[in-house]
């Protein structure tokens, strides 16, 4: 991960702040198994924040059931909350999404979501935390 983010910690600090699963997903780019994450079937009203730094990433009103087994959103909470990075791993070309504040890997964004954006942010539950208003 690059260190060109407003919030940065050493590897040891990230390991101390996060659970092993959160660390592997957010700092190492791992992916949790489909239909296993805490938020894939979570429908309460509230806000989804970056588990690593607390930045607001998504609102519950933009969450939808994409049938993929991961939390899916059609829009980020505010312009600039999410950074997009070209990902050519695993023999595919995808768009990785990261927290713009700390660079944490969140998941990927695809162009098969609902209107009005047509986007589907496919996010690991281990990368986010939910807060009710």
Image (cartoon, rainbow, N blue to C red):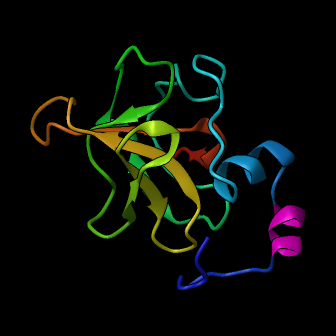
- Position of 26 with respect to 89 (left or right) is right
Image coordinates of residue 55 in percent, x first then y, are 52, 66
| Residue 14 lies in the magenta-colored region | yes
Residue farthest left in this picture: 116
Residue at position x 62%, y 50% in the image: 29
Is 33 on the left or on the right of 90, as rendered? right
Say whether residue 74 is magenta.
no
Residue that appears at 17% across and 29% down: 114
- Quadrant assignment, res 100: bottom left
Residue in the foreground of this view, choosing between 84 and 89: 89
**Residue bounds of the magenta highlight:** 11-17
Badge count:
0
Give the residue drawn at x 33%, y 56%.
77
Q: Is residue 98 above or below residue 69?
A: below
Whether residue 12 is situated above or below residue 59 in the rendered picture: below
Q: Residue at the location (51% across, 38% down)? A: 90
Specify whether residue 40 is in view. Answer: yes
**Foreground residue, 85 or 39?**
85
Q: Nearer the viewer, residue 50 or 102?
A: 102
Above-or-below relation of 12 to 45:
below
- Asked whether, in this view, residue 11 is left or right of residue 44, the answer is right
> x and y percent of residue 41 in the render?
52, 19
Q: Position of residue 66 (x, y in %)?
A: 34, 20
In the displayed structure, 36 sits above or below 8; it is above
């Amino acid at each position: 991960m690059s260190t060109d983010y407003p919030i940065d910690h050493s590897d040891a600090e990230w390991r101390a702040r996060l659970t092993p699963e959160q660390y592997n997903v957010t700092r190492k780019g791992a992916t949790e198994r489909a239909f296993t994450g805490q938020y894939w079937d979570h429908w309460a009203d509230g806000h989804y924040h970056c588990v690593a730094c607390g930045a607001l990433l998504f609102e519950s009103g933009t969450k939808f059931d994409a049938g993929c087994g991961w939390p899916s959103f059609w829009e980020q909470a505010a312009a600039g909350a999410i950074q997009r990075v070209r990902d050519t791993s695993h023999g595919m070309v995808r768009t990785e999404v990261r927290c713009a504040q700390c660079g944490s890997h969140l998941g990927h964004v695809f162009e098969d979501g609902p209107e009005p954006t047509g986007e589907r942010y496919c996010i690991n539950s281990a990368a986010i935390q939910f807060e009710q208003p």
